Amino acid sequence: MNNQLRSNCCVFIISSFSLFGVNLNSAIIANVQFSNSGPSYTGSGIIGSSGDYWNNLGGSGSGISLKNTGNTTIPGLSITWTSDGVYSASGDSGFNSTSYANLMDGMLYSLFSHNITLSGLTPNTDLELYLYSQGDSASDGRRLGITANGISAITSPAVSSASTFTLNQNYLKMNVQSDSSGILSINYSASHDEANVNGFQLAAVPEPKEMSMAVAMALGVLAILRRNIRPSNPKNS
């Protein structure tokens, strides 16, 4: 199969997914940053797009409604959370000169165990949780411990001068699931020194039926091409 044909095949398959509503990307449910009265962030995180809305929250709250990336309230979805407090690095962060400065400047801080609870999710749904953790210039060596509905992770020691996202250091990606009541409970604590949580993104992963449809469509297209494409240099009989 020549390069042009391969390219056309890929375009056709991707176009077919869109035509039949097959979404192979994680769909963001909500973005949250913690900065209280600090500057609000707009844009992508590890996932997302430019212009995405982020809910800007303080050090604690109960039953607060969340908005989606389009700045529209999500019916039934709310967040309850606690902390020792909320802190602004006031530019004293490795991300200060980057486009993520407003996201990474503010943070929850804690020496103890606290919870972030999301209620009103679809029950028993597979989710991706992206959680951001970087403090100010004094944060070297800090480690954040997370347990979300029984799934646990710990960051590697913080590097306060870091200015790019590094998996398992200044952000965690966790595959979790809402419980039978549609709740996701995120417990966070200081695994070393102090816990810092700048914010998080929560996304729904593609449903298995969508993935199955995508695979079936791709195999069908490839089978048709294999039947109809003759070798470019057939052997003489």
Image: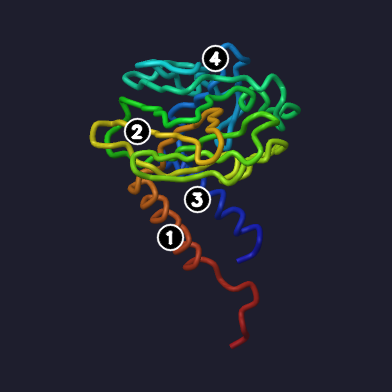
Question: Which residue shows up at 50% across the image and 16% down it?
Answer: 58
Q: Is residue 125 left or right of residue 41?
A: left
Residue 107 image offset from top left, x and y in percent: 56, 25
Labels 2 & 3 near each other (Cβ < 8 A): no
Q: Is residue 157 left or right of residue 108?
A: right
Question: Which residue shows up at 46% across the image and 45% down it?
Answer: 153
- Disc nearer the start of the sequence (1/2): 2
Q: Give the residue type at disc 4.
A: Asn
Q: Which residue is mark 1?
A: 219
Q: Which residue is mark 4?
A: 36
Mark 2 or 4: the one toward you? 4
Residue 154 image offset from top left, x and y in percent: 50, 45
In which image quadrant can residue 77 be found? top left
C-alpha separation, residue under disc 3 versus residue under disc 1: 10 Å
Q: Give the residue type at disc 2.
A: Leu
- Disc nearer the start of the sequence (3/1): 3
Q: Which residue is mark 2?
A: 184
Q: Would residue 58 be seen by someone viewing this image from the given angle? A: yes
In which image quadrant can residue 121 be found? top left
- Disc nearer the start of the sequence (1/4): 4
> Which sits in the foreground, 226 or 114?
114
Question: Which residue shows up at 39% across the image and 50% down it?
Answer: 211
Q: Is residue 235 left or right of residue 16?
A: right
